[in-house]
Amino acid sequence: MLISAALMLVMFTMLWGFGSKSHQTKQKNRCQENLQKLYLAMEIYAQDNHGDFPFFPAALNSATALDVLVPKYNSDTALFICPGSKDSEIPAGKPIRDRKISYAYYMGRRIADKSEALLSDRQINTQARAADEFAFSSTGKAPGNNHHQYGGNFLFGDGHLVTSPARVPFSLVLTQGVVLLNP
C-alpha cells in the first residue's frame, strides 16, 4: 500500500509537476505574455531613440543593456522573469542591471529589423545559430533551461512571437553590430 502511494506520487509529479511538459507549456504561454509586454516598452523606447532598441556598449549581460527601460518605459520588473524559470523576483521599479533576468537580448537591433529575433528565453550560449541547432537545453539542465528541455520563446523585431523546441527551426544570425547577451 505504501509503495503504491509512493508510485502514484512519483507519477503525479512527473505528469503535472514543475518540470512536466504540460506545466511548461502553460509557463511558455505566460512567458509569451511577458515578452509581449516587454516589446511594448522596447518599441516606445525605440520611438524615443531614433529607431534604436536599448544599446549599452559595455554590457556583458542582457540585464545591463535593458536596464534603461526601468522605470521610464516599464516599472513592472516581474516581466523580466520567465514564469518557467526558477529565477528570483526583482523588486518593482528597481534597477535590473545588477539582477539576474531570464531573457536573452539581441543588442544592436533597430526597430526596422522586423524579421530578426530581439528577445528570447535564456539560451545555451551567445553564438549565432543555423536552423536545427540547439538554442535551448536539450536535457533540462542549465544553461538555456527556462522551460527545462521543452524549448523556449523568441520575440521578433515586429513584436510577433515564436515558440521553438530546443533545436530552433530557423537560423539566428548575428549581423554586424548585433551581440546576443544572455542573462
Image (tube, grey):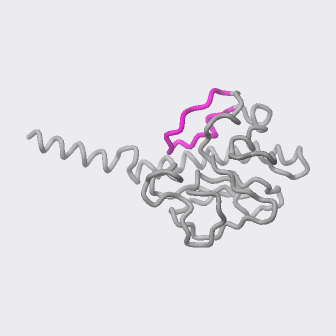
Residue at 73% from the left image edge and 64% from the top image edge: 174
Q: Can you give x and y, in whole percent of width and height, for residue 175 in the image?
A: 77, 66
Is residue 89 part of the magenta span, yes or no?
yes
What residue sits 60% from the left and 72% below the top?
Answer: 131
Tell me residue 18's x, y (percent).
40, 44
Most distant residue in the left direction: 1
Q: Magenta span covers which residues?
A: 76-92
Residue that appears at 70% across and 27% down: 93
Residue 116 percent coordinates (x, y): 73, 63
Q: Is residue 176 above or below residue 26?
A: below
Is 22 or 179 nearer to us in this picture? 179
The main secondary structure of the magenta stretch is loop
**Left/right of residue 72 with respect to residue 162 in the rendered view:** right
Q: Quadrant of the N terminus?
A: top left
Q: Quadrant of residue 130?
A: bottom right
Residue 67 percent coordinates (x, y): 74, 38
Is 70 on the left-hand or right-hand side of 77?
A: right
